[in-house]
């Protein structure tokens, strides 16, 4: 059986590397998330997406909406990394998501990933 695939979508290369390193050490396969502008085909379907949306008004929210609009990603859990707690109305439009507050506690993020995979 293949190990689960995690897309890590984070604009901070150091943070992305840290997350990917921790996930890979736990036998999870990380894939650099694709560009969402349609210029390249999507890689294999992930089991979980970790998305850094930044602030409650940042461009990451548009990426989250775009992900939810891609049919083949229906049902894929998304873990949002946020600076501040977003309003419930913003979360409702994305369907079920988990929230990881920044600065990220890696142990908590790993627990969230495992819960999404369960």
Image (spheres, helix red, strand yellow):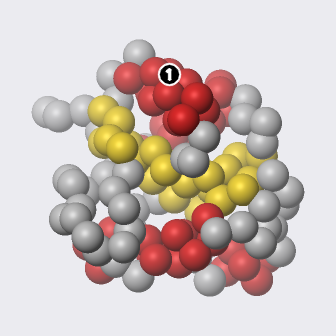
The crowd level at tag 1 (other Cα within 10 Å; few <14, some 14-19, many 20+) is some
Camera-side residue: 83 or 112?
83
**Left or right side of 33 for 105:** right
Residue 5 coordinates in the image, percent (x, y): 30, 42
In the displayed structure, 102 sits above or below 107; it is below
**Left or right side of 84 for 97:** left
Give the residue displayed 72% in from the left and 78% down from the top: 90
**Left or right side of 14 for 105:** right
Q: Secondary structure at mark 1?
A: helix
Q: Residue furthest top?
A: 25
In the displayed structure, 10 sits above or below 27; it is below
Q: Which image quadrant for residue 58? A: bottom right
The image quadrant where one finds the C terminus is top left
Dot 1 corresponds to which residue? 22
Give the residue displayed 50% in from the left and 28% down from the top: 17
Give the residue displayed 83% in from the left and 74% down from the top: 87
Residue 6 coordinates in the image, percent (x, y): 38, 43
Q: Residue furthest left?
A: 1
Residue 22 visible from this viewpoint: yes
In the displayed structure, 30 sits above or below 9; it is above
Camera-side residue: 56 or 107?
56
């Amino acid at each position: 059986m293949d190990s689960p695939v995690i897309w890590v979508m984070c604009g901070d290369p150091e943070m992305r590397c840290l997350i990917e390193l921790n996930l890979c050490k736990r036998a999870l396969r990380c894939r650099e998330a694709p560009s969402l502008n349609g210029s390249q085909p999507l890689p294999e379907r992930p089991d979980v997406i970790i998305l850094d949306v930044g602030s409650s008004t940042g461009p990451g929210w548009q990426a989250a909406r775009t992900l939810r609009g891609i049919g083949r990603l229906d049902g894929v859990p998304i873990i949002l990394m946020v600076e501040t707690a977003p309003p419930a109305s913003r979360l409702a439009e994305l369907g079920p998501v988990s929230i990881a507050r920044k600065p990220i506690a890696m142990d908590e993020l790993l627990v969230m990933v495992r819960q999404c995979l369960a």
